[in-house]
Image (cartoon, rainbow, N blue to C red):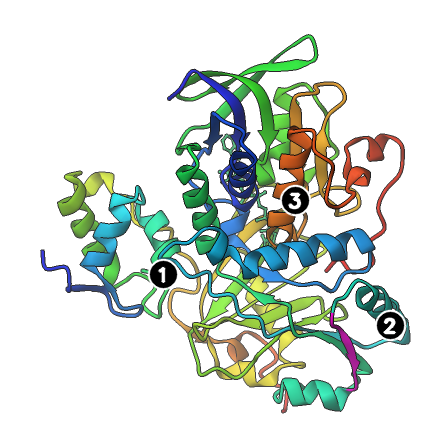
Amino acid sequence: MKSKANVVIVGGGIIGASIAYYLAKAGVEDIIIIDKEYPSSGSTGRCGAGVRHQWGLEMNCLLAKDSIMEFERLHEEIPTDFDIDFKQKGYLMLAYTDKQVEQYKKNIKLQKSLGIDVNLLTPREAKEIVPHLNTEDLLAATFCPKDGHINPFIANLVYIIGAERLGVKVQKYTEVIDVEVKNGKVKSVLTTKGRVETNYLINAAGPYSQHIAEMAGVKIPVYSERHQILVTQPVKLIQDPMVISLKHGFYCQQVPHGSFIMGFGDPNELKTTELSSSWNFMEEMAERVLPVLPVLKDFKVVRQWSGSYNMTPDAQPILGNSEEVNNLYFACGFSGHGFMLAPSVAKLTAQMLTDKPLDIDVNVLNLKRFAEDKLIKEPSVV
Amino acid sequence: MDDKIIICRCEDITVGEIKKLVSMGLDTIEELKRVTRCGMGSCQGRTCQGLLQSTLRDITGKPVSEIKPHKFRPPSKPVPLGIFGGEHIEE
Ligand SMILES: Cc1cc2nc3c(=O)[nH]c(=O)nc-3n(C[C@H](O)[C@H](O)[C@H](O)COP(=O)(O)OP(=O)(O)OC[C@H]3O[C@@H](n4cnc5c(N)ncnc54)[C@H](O)[C@@H]3O)c2cc1C
């Protein structure tokens, strides 16, 4: 491995890989990605990979819109033999309370003002989109046809290929074990395969971002939380959109290959980076999803697995550099929506590092917000 | 080995495809699984794991003992979702 680099990126998941690509595209040279395993071994390769415009804050709508546009044109940006299988058949978000309907109406007003096509549907209209939807107790739903699902492994791989073509080095199976800081600057990182001196360090370590920060002597209020997910055998294509119910806490999507994938937010999940599977996940999953999508009962589950959400106190990411160690940049704390924000976050991180004006104002996502008690209030976190 | 030989019957993955990916540096079973879905189908690797291990041995020259199989995940065979709960739910 090289002993010197201009930029070291810890983590080759969708975040680290896309940052490497856009940095190199911006003309930054001598970049190395270091991953303790391989790209998509972390949360990226374990995620639901849904992408949606339907957020409740302008900044998040803009980040999602820009990212989805980049995913739409990824093949043009980085031509390869691989297909990210972008299924743009929408997200159907179900509302069961008046409060939820009111919130969704507010969101739609904002989204429309930003040029995002989202509509409030009656239960009957929702059923036209998902014929097997049980609309009992359903008050309304929102639908954005441009939301969808992407193959996360391939998207991650395509960014890695794009970065490598621009000269980025990818060092797999190499763990960063310490960070050397002098006079408020990262000098080098120590890895299991040797030391690398660097001018910049980017923390894109996903579920382990808090450990990397700690190595550099910076405390970040971040922890990881296990989230479980399952997949069924492929069946004929019957469900276009991702279906999300905040009331039942689940998301459920049929991928182009025919399998259904689904998961739910469990408030009692383990707060660790541990990636085991629990026996009660499948039971609870079935109990939550079957009342709404009863047709799923005959579909056979082939596999369950788990991944980590990297959580901040407001479930919004940390971007930008730290004041204490100013050549240390963060791109972590993405909670359950880091995949869909990656391209935009990556472009912005490249702009920050090269002192360019930012396309989208994300200054509120800096690390200082926690100390200053300026948490971000996004109403549409699943 | 003939490139047209199918290694993974669930997902239709051939020796040729594996060779191509190995040449790109994707030379472990976990990495190949993510990119090709080899081992993600109905058999969950029971049919293809051994074949993939010996194919990787032939391509890379590594002994099979150094070619780690993919992680095994529950349930051990396909089970209808309805069995896990909510089976009492009427449509
Ligand atoms: C079950 C589940 C469902 C999800 N569904 C969605 C969804 O539908 N839509 C969405 O947008 N997001 C979703 N997410 C969230 C999404 O997966 C993450 O936000 C996103 O993948 C984060 O990408 P990343 O590159 O930061 O992290 P990762 O993909 O985890 O990459 C981090 C990398 O850093 C490496 N690393 C860590 N520590 C070190 C070290 N010390 N040295 C070297 N390398 C190191 C790891 O090996 C890893 O490869 C979901 C997550 C889970 C778990």
Cα distance, mark 2 to mark 1? 40 Å
Subunit of label 2: A
Up the image or down, A332 lies above or below A189; here it is: below
Ligand 1 under 8 Å from disc 2 Cβ: no
Dot 3 falls on a residue whose secondary structure is: helix
Q: Mark 1 highlights which residue?
A: B37
Task: Classify residue A104 by image quadrant.
Answer: bottom right
Q: Give the residues drawn in magenta, as a range.
A: A117-122
Residue A158 coordinates in the image, percent (x, y) = 44, 50
Type of amino acid under label 2: Lys
Res. A271 in view: no
What residue is pinned by disc 2?
A105
Residue type at mark 3? Val
Q: Determine which quarter of the picture holds residue A22.
A: top right
Pinpoint the chain carrying mark 3: A
| Placement of the C terminus of chain A among the 4 image quadrants | bottom right
- Residue kind at label 1, given as amino acid type: Arg
Q: Position of residue A2 (x, y in %)?
A: 40, 19
Task: Check disc 1 and report its element: helix, strand or loop.
Answer: loop
Circle 3 packing at 10 Å, graded few (<14), some (14-19), many (20+), is many
Q: Name the chain letter of the residue that bears numbered label 1.
A: B
Q: Left or right: A4 with respect to A53? A: left
Disc 1/disc 3 C-alpha distance (Å):
28 Å
Q: Dot 2, crowdedness within 10 Å: few (<14), some or many (≥20)?
A: some
Residue drawn at x 66%, y 90% is A128
Residue A345: numbered disc? 3
